Amino acid sequence: EMPIGREVAAWSASPRLDGLAVPPPNRFIPTDLSIKALSIKARGASTAQGGGGGAARRVKPALLLNTDSVRLHFLQDERFGRPKAFAFVSLRTPQLYESAAAAAQAELYAALLSDALQDVTYQAARAGLSAGASVGWQGLSLSLSGYDQRLPELAALVADSLRTFDVAPLAFERQRDGLLRQLRGADKRQPVEQAAYRRNLALETPRYTNEQLAAGLEKATLPQVLGLQRRLLPEVEVEALLCGNVAEGQATQLVLKLLNALGSRPLPVARRPVRRVRVLPAGERTLQQFVAASQAEVNSATEVYFQVGGDEADDWVLLTLLSQLMSKAFYSELRTK
């Protein structure tokens, strides 16, 4: 049996194996976990409602930046006391919804981007951060979350990756086939989903049918998507919300880093995306009826839709809350009684 001293010496002198090493330093690991002092604007955004010491507090984001091309909303955490923050960024452009073909290519680009971000942000994810992206009629939306110290670096990394991530032909074909299957299978969804789809088609413009989007995807090519990636966001209007353990200067720094990485020009007011909604005749009943495309469908659905006027101030928040309260009551009545 080898003496312990000789065994230790043998292990110490063992040859180094290729590929076996300590991981490189992760620049996204935070070194500052301090809780930020409440800023003056954050104090002003939180106001007491009612009288007495137990008055409820109404929290409202402060507007840090408000220019022709950038609006930054800021809400500093004063309740949870965790060294984390969240950023939601809307990059508005008409580029991604100018036609059904453009919308289809944009959806394909977003699917490829989501895959690429898993690789690009791997080190950030290991350090407790996350990033996501989606497209819609208004443009491109980004979401960032995690330890607040490294959030600006993550924002710059994601913005820089938008036009530079690699697209492999195999990944392109895989994502296109997946999106086509979703669109072609849309007529097999539940009747209640199809009712909502038909209602949106009737009331909103621009909005494209599943058939139009599928036709656009069938004709989409890898060079077209790569061209979209290179030309992405030549002009943009930015609206962002930062909330959590973040100071005013840090919030501004994140948005400026993102803008510098994009290098986009301000989007003129006349070119900003607008979706119009058809106003239904007041006091009259408008009826739409459709037969399900799938002959195997044996269920039916009725959707009753009420228009309550223009989108003003925070009315949409109140409507969302009312909808949530009503949905629970309906669910309880229909499913359990």
Image (cartoon, helix red, strand yellow):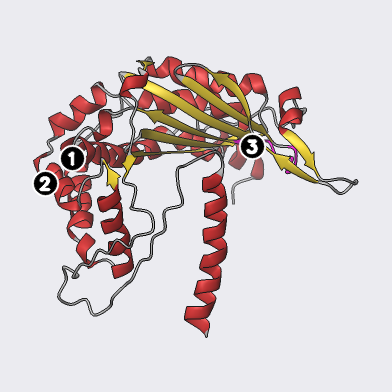
Q: Is residue 45 magenta?
A: no
Q: Of all residues shown, which one is farthest toward the front?
A: 283
Mark 1: which secondary structure? helix
Secondary structure mainly formed by the magenta segment: loop
Q: Are marks 2 and 1 in contact (CB under 8 Å)?
A: yes
Q: Nearer the viewer, residue 296 or 272?
A: 272
Disc 3 versus disc 1: distance between alpha carbons?
A: 39 Å
Q: Amino acid at mark 3?
A: Lys
Q: Is residue 208 left or right of residue 58?
A: left
Residue carrying label 3: 84
Is 199 drawn above or below residue 154 in the view shown? below
Label number found at residue 100 = 1
- The structure residue drawn at horizontal position 56% and vertical position 19%, both measured from the top left corner, is 65
Pick whichever of labels 3 and 1 is earlier in the sequence.
Answer: 3
Q: Nearer the viewer, residue 256 or 236?
A: 236
| Pointer 2 local density, CA inside 10 Å: few below 14, some 14–19, many at least 20 | some
Q: Of all residues shown, which one is farthest toward the right?
A: 53
Q: Give the magenta-colored segment's residue range.
A: 78-85
Q: Of all residues shown, which one is farthest toward the left?
A: 219
Mark 3: which secondary structure? strand
Residue carrying label 2: 215
Q: Amino acid at mark 2?
A: Ala
Mark 2: which secondary structure? helix
Q: Nearer the viewer, mark 3 or mark 1?
A: 1
- The structure residue drawn at horizontal position 39% and vertical position 32%, both measured from the top left corner, is 120
Q: Is residue 79 magenta?
A: yes
Q: Nearer the viewer, mark 3 or mark 2?
A: 2
Quarter occupied by residue 27: top right
